[in-house]
Amino acid sequence: MLGTGGRVRDVVAALLARPDEIMLEIGAGGELMVARLRVVIAAMLLVLPVTSALAGGSVKDTLIGLAGAIVINIFAHLWLALARRRRLFRWLPFASSAFDVTATTVLLIILAADHLPAGLNNLTAWCGYVVAIVLTAPRSDGRIALFAGALAIGQYSLLALWAFASAGSPEQLISSDYGAITLPGQLQRVILLGVFTLITAMVVYRMQRLVEMSGTDGLTRLPNRTWLMYRVPRLFDSVRHDGDSLTLALIDLDHFKRINDAHGHHAGDRALRHVVSVLRELAEPGEWLVRIGGEEFVLLLRKPIGTAWERVDAIRRALGERPFEPERGADTVALSFSAGLAGFPHEGSDLSRLLRRADGRLQQAKLQGRNRVVARDT
C-alpha cells in the first residue's frame, strides 16, 4: 500500500510540475495545432444557424446561434494569432482551455434558460466539455489537463445546482424530448467528467515520461543531445534579451578508452558517473551540463568566454584531484579532460556553429597534449 501511495504521489507531483524544455516546446506545437482546429470548428459553427433557419427554426434562435458562432470565431482567431507566437505567452494554454470549457457552459446556460432539460440533458452540447478536456493532451502539460477538468466539473456542477434551485415545479425538470433532470443522472455526468480528466492526465503523464526518456541520458541521468537542441534556442533568446554572454564548452575525457580496456565497460560506466558526480558537485547557478555521447559533454555557462575559461580550467584541476577507484582496493586512476570553448553570439549565432568552433579548439587541446582548456584559435 505504501508503495502504491508513493507511486500516486509521484504521478501527481509530475503532473503538477512545470514541464521541461522539450515538453514546453512540444506543448507549444500542440497549442498551435489545437488553435488551428478550433478555427475550423468555429467556421463550421457558422453553418448551423443557417441550417436551422432553412429547416424552419425561429428567427430568435437563428440570431442567437449566429451571434454565438461569430463570438466563437473571433476568439478562435485571437487564440490562433497568440499561439503562432510560440511560448511567448505562458498563460495562453490555460486561457484558451478555460475559453473552451466556458463556451460549453455558456451554451448550456442559453439552452437551459429557455428550457431546463434542454440545457442539462443535451448530450451533444455536454460533450463540448469532453472535447475541451481531451484537447488539453496535445499541450503536454498535466497542469492544463487538471485545470480544464476541474473547471468543467465546477461549472457544470454549479449549472446543475442552479437548475434544481430555479425549477418552480417538478414538471419544469421533465421534457418529452430530453427526459427528466435527476440528481443521479447529473452526478453521473460529473463523475464522467472526472474520468475523462484522469484519462487525459494519464495520457499527458505517459507522454512526459516517454519524452523524458528521449531527452535524458540513461546512464548519467544528465540531459542529452535532444534536450540540448530544444533548450539552447530558448537560452539564446534569453541571453539576447538580457544582454548577457554565453559560452559553450565541449568536453572530452582524456584516454577514456584505456579504462574500458583495462578494467571493463562496467568500470567505464562507473567512471563516467564519477565524473558527472564531481561536475555536478562543482556546478554553479547558470551552468548546464549535457552528455552528448560517449565520453563527450557540453557545459553551458552564462559567462563571457574569458571568465568561462577560468571556470572550466578550475573544474579540470578539481577533477584531477578526485581520482577514480575502478574496484575496491585497486589503484586509483587520475581522470582529466580536454575542452574547447566558443562564445555566443560573436563566435556563432546557433548551436551547430558553436559546436563546430568549440570542436576545433578541442582538437587543438588534444594536439597540445590534452588535459587543457582552449578558448582561442592558434
Image (cartoon, grey):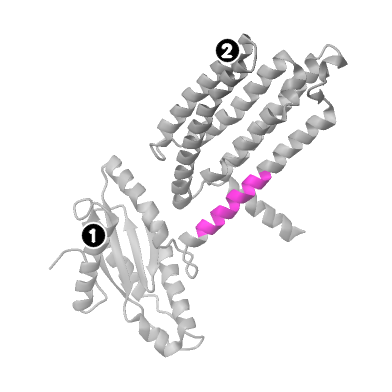
Q: Is residue 298 magenta?
A: no
Magenta span: predominant SS is helix
Residue sitting at the far left:
378
- On the image, the x and y values in percent for residue 57 come to 65, 14
The residue closer to the viewer here, 44 or 1, is: 44
The residue that appears at 71% across and 13% down in the rendered structure is 114
Few, some or many residues within 10 Å of mark 2 (<14, 14–19, 20+): some
- On the image, the x and y values in percent for residue 199 come to 67, 47
Count of all numbered marks drawn on residues in the image: 2
The part of the image, by quadrant, that contains residue 159 is top right
Of tags 1 and 2, the one toward the viewer is: 2
Secondary structure of residue under mark 1: strand
Q: What quarter of the picture does the N terminus occupy?
A: bottom right
Q: Which residue is mark 1?
A: 342
The residue that appears at 83% across and 28% down in the rendered structure is 183
Q: Is residue 200 magenta?
A: yes
The residue that appears at 69% across and 18% down in the rendered structure is 111
Few, some or many residues within 10 Å of mark 1 (<14, 14–19, 20+): many
Question: Marks 1 and 2: CB-CB under 8 Å?
Answer: no
Secondary structure of residue under mark 2: helix
Q: What quarter of the picture does the C terminus occupy?
A: bottom left
Q: Is residue 360 above or below residue 345?
A: below
User: Magenta residues?
Assistant: 198-212
Q: Residue 198, can we see it?
A: yes
The residue that appears at 46% across and 60% down in the rendered structure is 215
Q: In the rendering, which numbered label is found on residue 63?
A: 2
N-terminal label among 1 and 2? 2
In-image side of 112 versus 67 (left or right): right
In-image side of 212 versus 123 (left or right): left
